[in-house]
Amino acid sequence: MALDDVTDAVLAVVDKIPAGRVASYGAVGAAAGTTARRAGRAMRTHGHLTAWWRVVRADGTSPVGERARVHWDEEGIPYTVTRTREGARYRVDMRWAGLRPGEI
């Protein structure tokens, strides 16, 4: 399957995130030379080709936290669960697990 250059760059950056750590869409985008929104689009369509659970929103939340938590538990990524009327909200502790743009 041929990927466009931006998607290829985003996936290559995600491949560099070490186990037990996460990065925000913005940090991934910056390291790939694109925007957070474009990184998110690449992850939505092709994230299954890499460790998708290591990419979260800047505040540590994940739109797929319910699925990601299995991987977070395996890798020791610290997170909290908050119950809301809409369901559970999962948030990674970015102080401990989050990479900064220059660390990727």
Image (cartoon, rainbow, N blue to C red):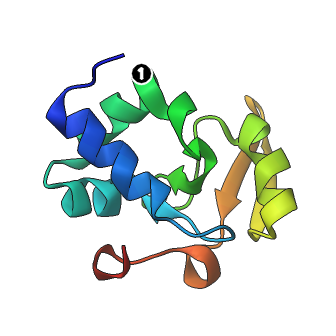
Please report the residue visible at 22 percent of the width from the left and 55 percent of the height from the top. Answer: 32
Quarter assignment of residue 103 = bottom left
Going by the picture, which residue comes out furthest to the front? Answer: 1
Q: Say which element carries label 1.
A: helix
Q: Is residue 77 left or right of residue 27?
A: right
Within 10 Å of the Cα at label 1, are there few (<14), some (14-19), or many (20+) other Cα atoms? few
x and y percent of residue 26 in the render?
A: 30, 57
Q: Quadrant of the N terminus?
A: top left
Placement of 23 over or under 40, stated as above or below: below
Q: Does residue 42 sit above or below 28 in this rendering?
A: above
Examine the image and state in which quarter residue 77 appears: bottom right
Residue drawn at (36%, 57%) of the image = 13
The residue tagged 1 is 45
In the rendered view, tell whether residue 50 sits above or below residue 28: above
Name the residue type under label 1: Thr
When asked about the image quadrant of residue 92, the answer is: bottom right
